Image (cartoon, coloured by chain):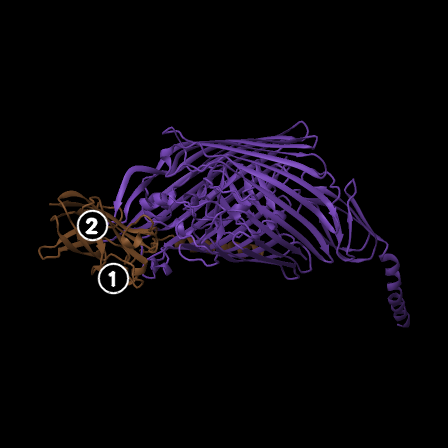
Amino acid sequence: MFNKNLGLYFFLLLLPVVSISQDCKLTVSGVVKDLSTNKPIIFANVYLKESQKGVYTDSLGFFKFESMCEGDLHLSISHIGCEVQEIFFSLTKDTNVIVFLDHNGHLLNEFKVEGEGGKATTQESQSINSKTIGENSDKSLANMLEGISGVSVIKNGSGIAKPVVHGLYGTRITILNNGVAQSGQQWGVDHSPEIDPLVANKITVVKGVGALEYQGSSLGSVILVEPNKIDNEPHLHGEARYSFETNGLGNGINLELQQYGKLFAWRVVGTLKKSGDNHTPDYYLTNTGNQQANIALQLEKKWNKKWSSALYFSSFNADLGVLRGSHIGNLTDLEEAFEREVPFYTEENFSYSINSPYQKVNHHLLKFHTKYIINEKQWLDFTYAGQYNLRKEFDVRRSGRSEMPALSLKQISNFIEGKYKNYLPKDWDLNIGFQINHVDNTNLPETGILPLIPDYLGFETGVYGLITKKMEKTTFEFGGRYDFENRKVAAISTEVPRYIYRTENDYHNLSALFGVTHEFQKNWKVAYNIGYASRNPEVNELYSNGLHQGVSGIEEGDPTLNKETSIKNTLSIKGNVKEKLFVEGMFYNQNIKDYIYLNPQDEIRLTIRGAFPVFKYQQTNVRLTGFDIATTYQASQRFAITAKYSYLKGMDQTNDLPLIFMPSNTIFAELDYELPKLGTFQNVGFTVNGNYVFEQKNLLASQDFVAPPEAYYLIGLKFSAEKQLKKLKLNLYLRTENLLNTTYRDYLNRQRYFADDLGFNLVAGVNIKF
Amino acid sequence: MKKFNKIVVSGLVILSVLASCNKEKDDPIIPNEEEVITTLNYTLTPAGGGTAIVLSFQDLDGDGGSAPTITGGALDSNTTYTGVLELLNEIESPTEDITVEVSAEGDDHQFFFEPSASDVTVSYTDMDANGDPIGITSTLTTNSTNTGTLKITLRHEPAKSATGVSSGDITNAGGETDIEVTFNLDVQ
């Protein structure tokens, strides 16, 4: 008894002595490498939060901290253009780590995108990382993606923007919000996706030929908005972001908090944004302000080694002002508006107020996801998602009716997905799955106006299978998908007295794709993909009937429209010469049979409001051909030049006419100068860029009310720097847009009929990581 | 594995709920289209007495559907008429008089009269709270015989203080067109 106690006593006494002598002799060392090239990164900043000490990696990407004590460690590794990597571990012995940084914005992205499920694909994609998202936090989703070659943006003013990939937009591309196909009101060119990009850590554009594993009617490209999994790190961490822009006096704050708790891991992201009237070089764009309040909550729980579940909730709430002067009456007003230098209703002074016309949009997503790992080669995945979408559009109306929405739609959708993955022997990967989606779209009768689109119920089911085979230098991908859609429509007649009529449609669709990538020589890869896909006509294309105020035309649907079918081919090549000159190119050709478009008719319809042009939804066979080319020349460690060129030509082959509303060709060039260290700042970057947008010449004068705008070029500057303040990592940035305050109009901006585009803008922001 | 079963069961429950959802869509509620203007009547009564002439534009089913009915008129030369405009919504039952709304928001509305024949002139005889014309009541004067048209436009939120607008010149008025109709006139 006595002996035992004595022994314990001695042990307690000795312990501190032993640990002091042992602890602070430990070493933490490591190598920082580029994720895509596996090459060491020189001059990366490695910061040890506990001792508030920073070092730089040497010419071999190597770093070392000596005389370290036992205990918890937080390492923060950063390099210019890369996402900051945070590493946490408990130090008990000498430790060596390898850190991979994702060198984004660089052209040398890998071909293969390993998604959440580790699915390899042969399709080309480009991403923006959380650093880029953070330094563009003032922008909307579509505007953030504008820098990716092949992506353009349809705008209605500056706040309402939707992405265009390879000339297609709206329901022809699929947007996935955290793995769930966004189910909203995407039928109008003036409807922007209801997603806050700041909830994402990564946004990817797959410029592909088909997205067979996703539900939706994608004719090729897909946009993935993905939050990261929560880091396995027991302490509370987060990031606070603030941005200010001079044009529109916009302010935005965003806060992200996360912790890997004992019970579960959690993350919460909130955004508040408000901006007022934007300014062209010469006048205010009255009523173009917008405000947003968004929140996202992510919970993750690992039940055991095989089981994990996640719950995700996001809420997007926005009021988006529409230029007052773009709200006009009939054709006479429209013609008059074109003639004017300054739009009607332009106010002398700036204002934050948002009046009619404006849009009020709410979108809520609840997602439950669970994954069961059967064994190391196989897993099962199940997702349920519910979405609730409300869209109200307010017009200028008589007798106080401006307070009443002119369009009020409610959409509820319920989605179920099951996926199975198996890594078969000999590098064959198998992915199969099914999806069921139910959509209930209802017009709320509060408008006092006959609805533009009818009420409907949609029921979609789909199954898919994808197989990839990896060989030493070549990867093959095959896939197939079958979809069934049943749509029940309940519409109100245009004749008086009004009555209700019903229609029902069934659609059976097959999609298929084939892809191959091949590595040749050293550092060069080529990929070829072909995909067959179809898209069912949307309700607006089938049934809309009436005046579309924003475009001052009468739009008539056609209930007999067929589905569109598309065959898209892409050929891409990517590689580098001596890791100095990086080249990337993609050529594509897409033939769409029965492409649905709004065709202006010869008829001018007389109404009590005057004459209106008539547009009918019609079908034709079209061909979209284009290429995106980008090169970077890394002249030295500090200096790089990038140039990009995008070309697209759309033709209506049946009528031998140019296809309207196709993006203009663009040339973009950028000079980057990077310094790992400047005074007390790290990772300091200066950038000058220029963007030249060609006039859209592939259009006949008879195909639009006014000729497409002239070519223009815009110059921008960027500056960013990082600073470590004890445990806080500061990222400061300054950005100018339209530096020369150029007066211009853009072909894809609907507001171009009425007003110039935005003038000079200075954006300043700070992101604090803790 | 128990949890896995639970998930499968709850998945099946959701599936069956979804399946039961797939019934007919409820009847949409037909909105109360109180804002529509189906009819414009311009009643011209000779100042010296006599039968009134009514210029009328009527489109009972709104935009689209069947074409509107437009009735012009024959006027006497060298005559002064008292003009009264009336706007109706005949989709509603009973018929709603929209003129009341326009009159109540007089400072946000103005009618413009544009005769093609210079011999016909129209002048305002009413005014809004700011002393600017609205045009619900007017005087139309004919001179020599001729034929032509009369265009009547109603602008919402025009710039009434802009040059010429208060005297009936639409050029600088701006605003949004709520009504734009053209009648044939035969001055005999």
- Answer above or below: position of A328 versus B137: above
Question: Which disc, if any, is residue B121?
Answer: 2
Q: Nearer the viewer, residue A572 or A379?
A: A572
The image shows residue B166 at horizontal and vertical percentages of 29, 55
Where disc 1 sits, the SS reads helix
Image mark 1: chain: B
Check disc 1 and report the residue beneath it: B100
Where disc 2 sits, the SS reads strand
Image mark 2: chain: B
CA separation in Å, label 1 and label 2:
25 Å
Chain that the image shows in purple: A
Question: Dot 2 surroundings within 10 Å: few (below 14), some, or many (20 or more)?
Answer: some
User: On the picture, is A82 further left or further right than A351?
Assistant: right
User: On the picture, is A93 further left or further right than A338?
Assistant: right
Q: Nearer the viewer, residue A555 or A641?
A: A641
Q: Nearer the viewer, residue A362 or B138?
A: B138
* Residue type highlighted by circle 1: Val
* Residue type highlighted by circle 2: Thr
- Answer above or below: position of B99 versus A56: below
Q: Are marks 1 and 2 in contact (CB under 8 Å)?
A: no
Q: Quadrant of residue A621?
A: top left
Chain that the image shows in brown: B
Q: Residue furthest top?
A: A521
The quadrant of the picture occupied by the N terminus of chain A is bottom right
Labels 1 and 2 share a subunit = yes
Question: Dot 1 surroundings within 10 Å: few (below 14), some, or many (20 or more)?
Answer: some
